[in-house]
Image (tube, helix red, strand yellow):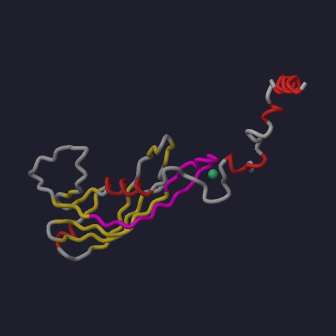
Amino acid sequence: MMLDISLALRSPGTPIPFVHKEGLEDTVILGETVTFPAPAVLKGTCSIVDNALLIKGRLSVTAKGTCARCLSPVDYPVNVPVHETYLRADPREEVKDDPWEERLVFTGTKVDLSHLIMSLVLLDLPIRFLCAQGCQPLEEIIPEEELPSKDDNLDEAHPFSALKQLYTKFQEE
Ligand SMILES: [Zn+2]
């Protein structure tokens, strides 16, 4: 969705309060799907300073993921400060669709905030979602001392231990 900045353009230097809502598409992080049931909300001010548009405020949205340990659904609240500058682009200039060009620009009286919002949300999301409490990985559920030791019982578990005992006995004689 586009944010109308005509009020800010009419009174340069004056911060104009706004609330902007942006629906976010599902995204996949390390093979896990993350969804956003409600639109992201960017609340703040926009102002024209020199030839740039200054966006200040706070972005919040709830991301729904899956706990990497127990696979139950996890809500992750994104709540980050926003402080970005959009440069005014010349509409007569041919805009090349360069995927490496991360410059934030605006033309006319509307600005597209979707890329900024998605980038900020993705930067804030954890690599792995985890339950807040009461969730432990399997290796922590079984205490270390209750797990069979790797070395102590080797002889008893070893299929050739009986043979080894015979050999030792033979040497002693
Ligand atoms: Zn969990």
x and y percentages locating residue 149 in the rendered image: 76, 42
Residue 167 sits in quarter: top right
Q: Is residue 73 above or below residue 87?
A: above
Toward the right, the furthest residue is: 173
- Residue 4 at what x, y percent from top left? 25, 63
Q: Is residue 113 magenta?
A: no
Residue sitting at x 47%, y 52%: 36
Magenta-colored segment: predominant secondary structure:
strand
Left or right for 49, reference 61? left
* Residue sitting nearer the eye, 42 or 104: 104
Q: Is residue 36 above or below residue 163?
A: below
Q: Residue at x 52, y 50 (%)?
A: 128
**Magenta stretch, residue numbers:** 63-84
Check the image and name the residue furthest to the bottom.
Answer: 14
For the point 27% across and 56% down, the residue is 112
Work out whether 149 lies above or below 89.
above
Q: Residue 74, position in %: x, y?
A: 57, 53
